[in-house]
Amino acid sequence: MAILVIADHDNSSLSDATGKVVTAAAKLGGDIDVLIAGKGANGVADEAAKISGVRKVLLADDGALEKQLAEPMAALIADLAKDYDAVLAPASTSGKNFMPRVAALLDVMQISEIVAIESNDTFVRPIYAGNAIATVKSADAKKIITVRPTAFNAAELGGAANVETITPPALPNISEFVAEELTVSSRPELQSAKIVISGGRALGSSENFEKYIYPVADKLGAAIGASRAAVDAGYVPNDFQVGQTGKVVAPELYIAIGISGAIQHLAGMKDSKVIVAINKDEDAPIFSVADYGLVADLFTALPELENAL
Amino acid sequence: MKALVPVKRVVDFNVKVRVKADQTGVDLANVKMSMNPFDEIAVEEAVRLKEAGTVSEIIAVSIGPEKAQDQIRQALAMGADRGILVKTEMDAESLAVAKILKAIAEEEKPDLVILGKQAIDDDRNQTGQMLAALLGWPQGTFASEVKKDGDKLLVTREIDGGLQTVSLSLPAIVTTDLRLNEPRYASLPNIMKAKKKPLDVKTAEDYGVDLTPRLEVLKVSEPPKRSAGIKVASVEELVEKLKNEAGVL
Ligand SMILES: Cc1cc2nc3c(=O)[nH]c(=O)nc-3n(C[C@H](O)[C@H](O)[C@H](O)COP(=O)(O)OP(=O)(O)OC[C@H]3O[C@@H](n4cnc5c(N)ncnc54)[C@H](O)[C@@H]3O)c2cc1C
């Protein structure tokens, strides 16, 4: 079968998720092409060409694609999809934005956020905040799929695919980019970090995040995450939220500080390799998934932890 | 401006569902059902836009069982003006739901459809985007702020890297994220008033939409169990274990 993978990128670098989606695509078996849609993204196309298993890279360079807004992206991808049996994209906020639009344009029911592939029409995906796992078989001739990146390893680098520049079809002009406010951080990216330390409502303020969580994160080289309660209260930006409706992470080590362990939070971190929880309530549900639990007040435990590292 | 707000009846977010022993699905007998939390945020946003004078009429729609009337009544109690229930005992898929909503939108001609970004039962995150595609309208997904700006709609979106603001021509689709607002509780007098608001009952056939699923559920199983580990007595012991036992430091 012919497979198109939609790359996740910001016109200057390729996100880790793309290589993971290529691994998922390889499980379907067939020729894999990667689409880079953006503006001035030649460098990204060259990066994608190095992913092993890629037949060719399609580069669509157009001002209308610079911010990868859903309307032009979907028009482009639905047009390209004529030549493919399956289209895959990471379940990032970008993929989740344009892929269902592509699916509806093609009259296909999207298969969202898959975590495993059983055959070329049967897929596994979590439902109910990961409290159940569904195996679904698609009757659609074309498969439109978003992939949970943490469920697949990144493809090797070592390929040398050709980059082919393509001309997009007429793109709709019904939406316009206005502004963005991106979180700048020198710390590792939340979804690809080896260690994540997350704080909950118990932190009480953004100052306490800075005073207690950040120094430990820096000693560990960790990314910082948070529960919904901490984000809602404005202690940290929205893109820190881990969970069913935030980011899904699966680092080597996940440290939950002052987080109770609601099912919606667990949905985003329970596939981490090692889980540590520090909570002053010994009955907090988070301890039921923690490999190492410490019943303690975070305001004394975290400075101790910082010193011990 | 007229607003259409679809609401879904789902398992309450506090319920930890159990998988049925025969692996055909999850056990929903006698569990609490509620309005999907993201849809409550959608209703709230429409009501606030109405209170601000931007929206003139709010229509709440649900595609689901007879009992989904409860969720429509809740939307009416929160401030929606009238309801439409498209009755089906089938678990309609997002694409079919989007097709029904498209037919309703063509009849009602709203300027704005506000939906939840995801239903907390199937976690698919796609109905709003699909509806936008079928109507050829722009979409502002995962919204944390919605503002009318002349003849455009400014939508601030929660994205992986932070926030993004887009300007959409109207009519448009918005899907809600958690930070958009905090939904109100309906007051008792409003709950009483809602009982008298009009509610039309329809079927998928009325809109000519075929509900045959495209995805066949082969089985639903328990997730891999993660068992509780040990409690450590001190930070010192924790660090020692992480270094020497888990090998992650
Ligand atoms: C539609 C929907 C979607 C949601 N999506 C998400 C999501 O994606 N991610 C998410 O995280 N949540 C999500 N939630 C929210 C979720 O249900 C919980 O409300 C939230 O996770 C609670 O956050 P918390 O653990 O920080 O706060 P709490 O539940 O209030 O827990 C605080 C914890 O801190 C402990 N504590 C207090 N003081 C101290 C101290 N000094 N030292 C140590 N421990 C202390 C307490 O014992 C308690 O266990 C969602 C909810 C809904 C309805």
Image (tube, coloured by chain):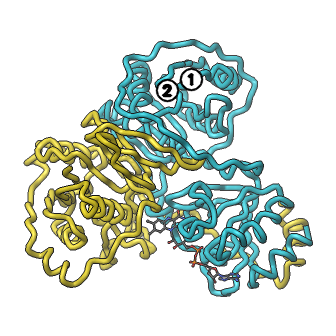
Measured in 3D between alpha carbons, the distance from the residue under mark 2 to the one under mark 1, in whole angstroms, is: 6 Å
Q: Secondary structure at mark 2?
A: helix
> Are discs 2 and 1 less than 8 Å apart at CB?
yes
Report the chain shown in cyan. Answer: A
- For the residue pair B139 and A265, the one nearer the viewer reads as B139
Looking at the image, residue A287 lies above or below residue B141: below
Looking at the image, residue A240 lies above or below residue A67: below
Q: Which residue is mark 2?
A: A65
Q: Residues within 10 Å of mark 2 (few under 14, many from 20)?
A: many
Q: Colour of chain B?
A: yellow
Q: Position of residue A15 (x, y in %)?
A: 65, 37
Residue at x 43%, y 26% (from the top left corner): A77
Q: Which residue is mark 1?
A: A39
Query: Which image quadrant is residue B118 in?
Result: bottom left
Residue at x 62%, y 29% (from the top left corner): A11
Please give the chain letter of the residue carrying mark 2. Answer: A
Q: In the displayed structure, does residue A31 sit left or right of residue B192? A: right
Q: Position of residue B39 (x, y in %)?
A: 33, 61
